[in-house]
Image (cartoon, rainbow, N blue to C red):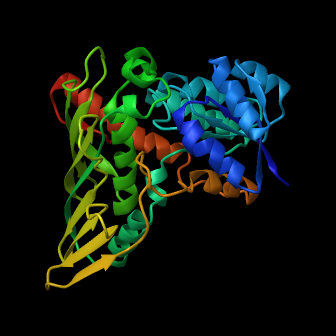
């Protein structure tokens, strides 16, 4: 049976990812859309033959939907996700899942209470090079892992967001954090996934240096240490003006893996014995034209509902990745290394 889906928030992430990917999935039917900007909601409704709403509470009351995508400013992720879960819908929420650990816990609790799925939209786990790297590391092909560096940066949300320079991304009361929440949390989730390890300590430097008239960070660099002693850096930036960087490098005893670092090969394995293996695995999801055509996030979410399986990035996973970013903020405020171990 086809799932009846509502998309709440019709900005860029809904327009470019959620709506077209639900539309392309034969198991899903978009029945309702919602945005506080009426024109935006109506444009999406017309395109996908859905009903337009400007108030999510009205939508949840009037429509009996099976699943909801929450594509809103960060400060609304938790309240709207909880309302949708309480209305009996499965929820796919954009990242970062919440603005605090307490909110994340409330979302997880709402999913349990209503026996619904909660998935967080960390699309980097579905990139072929990232999955291959995880496989190689797990197989022992790299031997002991020593270190890593991972980065995600581009010119900033003004080139991507539906509201350009006026976007909520630049407003602390709506965004909560800047580049670190927009991009850094993706890499925090990714590096946990690839290494199959949890982080125990984080130190961070965060700056607003490239953007004017904003009170959120546009450059962040984190130092991380894992439970098994792997140390590395994570950089998130809205100040990479020439070219997007979405690369990760893993340094191991037997090999170095370069992910999304070479323009032709999605994964390059450089072995200590001199051997080099290059993998052509398809393009990574990108804001630029020519990025991978689907994030696989929506398909996975729909499949997990249909088959009653736990989504790859459920609430607990989303919370662990968020915890790294929250820890980084604590580190900035206290000027100390922050322990993530509870």
Residue 39's image quarter?
A: top right
Direction from residue 145 to residue 294 in the image, left or right: right
Q: Residue at x 65, y 42 (%)?
A: 19
Tell me: 283 left or right of 236: right
User: Quick check: 217 left or right of 26?
Assistant: left
33 to 120, vertically: above or below: above
Reply above or below: 146 against 102: below
Residue 198: image location, x then y, percent: 35, 52
Front residue (pair 312, 121):
121
- Image coordinates for residue 169, horizontal then vertical, percent: 41, 25
Q: Is residue 86 left or right of residue 162?
A: right
Residue toward you, 83 or 47 = 47
Q: Position of residue 284 (x, y in %)?
A: 41, 58
Which residue is at a point 23% across and 43% down the rendered structure image?
242
The tally of labels here is: 0
Q: Is residue 180 something one can see in this rendering?
A: yes
Q: Quadrant of the C terminus?
A: top left
- Find residue 51 and report its horizontal and vertical position in percent: 80, 29
């Amino acid at each position: 049976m086809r799932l009846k889906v509502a998309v709440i928030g019709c900005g860029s992430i809904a327009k470019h990812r959620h709506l077209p990917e639900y539309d392309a999935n034969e198991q899903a039917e978009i029945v309702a859309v919602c945005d506080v900007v009426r024109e935006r909601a109506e444009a999406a409704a017309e395109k996908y033959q859905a009903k337009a709403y400007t108030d999510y509470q009205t939508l949840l009351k009037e429509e009996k939907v099976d699943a909801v995508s929450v594509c809103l400013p960060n400060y609304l992720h938790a309240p709207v996700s909880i309302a949708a879960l309480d209305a009996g819908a499965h929820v796919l929420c954009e990242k970062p899942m919440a603005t605090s650990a307490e909110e994340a816990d409330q979302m997880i609790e709402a999913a349990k209470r209503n026996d619904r799925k909660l998935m967080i939209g960390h699309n980097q786990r579905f990139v072929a090079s990232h999955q291959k790297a995880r496989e190689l590391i797990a197989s022992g092909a790299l031997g002991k892992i020593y270190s890593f560096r991972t980065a995600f940066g581009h010119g900033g949300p003004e080139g991507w967001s539906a509201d350009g320079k006026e976007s909520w991304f630049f407003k602390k009361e709506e965004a909560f954090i800047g580049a670190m929440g927009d991009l850094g949390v993706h890499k925090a989730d990714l590096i946990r996934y690839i290494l199959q390890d949890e982080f125990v300590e984080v130190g961070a430097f965060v700056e607003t240096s490239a953007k004017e008239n904003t009170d959120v960070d546009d450059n962040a660099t984190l130092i991380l240490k894992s439970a098994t002693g792997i140390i590395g850096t994570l950089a998130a930036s809205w100040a990479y003006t020439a070219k997007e960087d979405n690369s990760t490098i893993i340094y191991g005893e037997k090999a170095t893996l370069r992910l999304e670092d070479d323009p032709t090969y999605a994964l390059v394995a450089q072995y200590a014995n001199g051997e080099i293996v290059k993998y052509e695995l398809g393009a990574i999801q990108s804001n630029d034209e020519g990025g991978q055509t689907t994030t696989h996030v929506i398909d996975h979410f729909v499949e997990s509902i249909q088959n009653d399986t736990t989504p790859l990035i459920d609430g607990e996973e989303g919370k662990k990745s968020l915890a790294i970013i929250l820890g980084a903020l604590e580190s900035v405020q206290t000027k100390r290394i922050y322990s993530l171990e509870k």
